[in-house]
Amino acid sequence: MAIEHEYLSQAAPRTHRLPLVLRAPVSGRTWREFLHAQLNLPIALAAFTWGVVTISLGLGLLITFIGLPVLALGLAGTRLLGAFERTRARLLLGVEVEAPHPVQAGNRGGGPLGWTWSLLRSGASWRQLIYGVVLLPWALCTFTVSLVTMLIGWSLLLYPAYQWMYPTWWGTPGMGVYSDTRGVQIYLDNPFEVAAACLVGLVVVLASPWVLRAMACVDGLLVRALLGPSRLDARVTELEQDRGVVVDTAAADLRRIERDLHDGAQARLVALAMDLGLAKEKLLEDPDAAARMVDEAHGEVKLALQELRDLARGIHPAVLTDRGLDAALSSVAGRCTVPVAVQVDLDTRPAPAIEGIAYFTVSELLQNISKHSRARTARVEIWRSADRVMLQVWDDGQGGASTDAGSGLAGLAERLGSVDGLLVVDSPVGGPTTITAELPWRDR
């Protein structure tokens, strides 16, 4: 019972007796954001000085051979600054920013020349240089506002605790708030003024976390916008990955076609040629045996033709080219071991590539239904939604399908992703299973 009580106490959600507005001034987040704002200024000064000096010097020396290396050195320094700033933002602000792609030195044959040229062509390097320049005026603001806010707030809030020091050590009745050349001086020395100062300090202290948080949000935006990979870089990386998936898929399809030809139709045609040769030899000696062998060869020809038709259908069915998705999917549904209802609601036909991907996606999903689902009925629906082709396959089987790594659905999701498609699987254990795919609409 003691163990159970301890477990329950640990699992219970943590509750705070003080509201957030009272906790915020002393929370770790507030002081981390304050530290970040204070560090902005020295870092910005160093970054601005480095960037302006190296770039100005490099531009001035462009008429000589030294200019380009100096520019590259300046950009390399800004990349180091970017790495430092991403780390600082992660530790103090909790902002996670992915690093831009590293500079590849092979664009101009490698070596120092290739490294220099790659740095100069890197958009990420120039954006990090802009960050170092833009940071300085913003750092002046954050440093000043955060320091003044915290000093005024806490000094006024804690004034009753150290007000006695003024008459004891400095010979004044309290904190001076006004003084002029005529000798007029105003001090916070009576209980009412001390209480009012303390109240003002409390208001400033309670407001300071939200001021710091607002400035930290701007800091985070700057880091994300200028120190992370650009949308173009991310898109290029995504397209490179998709291209790899397409190449691997195409290679796998070619290997499958080669294997099917070698193990199926080719082997059957070789056996057919041998049988016909034997039948030719027996044609005069034993006409009846030759006739039987020719009849068997005729059956082999039919099987070889059927295998070739199946192989051609797996590459690209003629019915899809001639009559479109409705007829082609109806043909696929007719070969499924489960009754399948097909509904295609498309006013026009999409591009052949998209049409082919939709066809093979449905074909593979119906094969999965036949092999694994134990379903009694299934349904296929295809329609257009704005600039997307929507595809949904439903069955009342046992469920449990997923896109975990290594599954057939995972490979299907990768192939759809290579053309900016998407695959969503809803398959609870016990069924039913609903698999929704979407593809970009491209006109013929």
Image: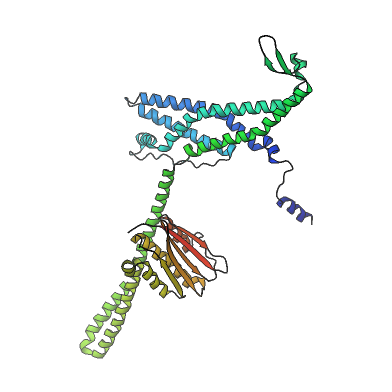
Residue 331 lies, in percent from the top left, at 38, 73
Residue 436 lies, in percent from the top left, at 48, 62
Q: Is residue 363 above or below residue 174?
A: below
Residue 25 lies, in percent from the top left, at 68, 34
Q: Is residue 444 above or below residue 147?
A: below
- Residue 286 visible, this angle: no
Residue 429 figure quarter: bottom right
102 to the left or right of 198: left
Q: Residue at x 69, y 31 (%)?
A: 203
Assign the N terminus to one quadrant of the image: bottom right
Give the farthest residue toward the top.
182
In front here: 360 or 280?
360
Q: Residue at x 44, y 35 (%)?
A: 127
Residue 210 figure quarter: top right
- Residue 169 visible, this angle: yes
Assign the C terminus to one quadrant of the image: bottom left
Q: Residue at x 35, y 40 (%)?
A: 107
389 to the left or right of 177: left
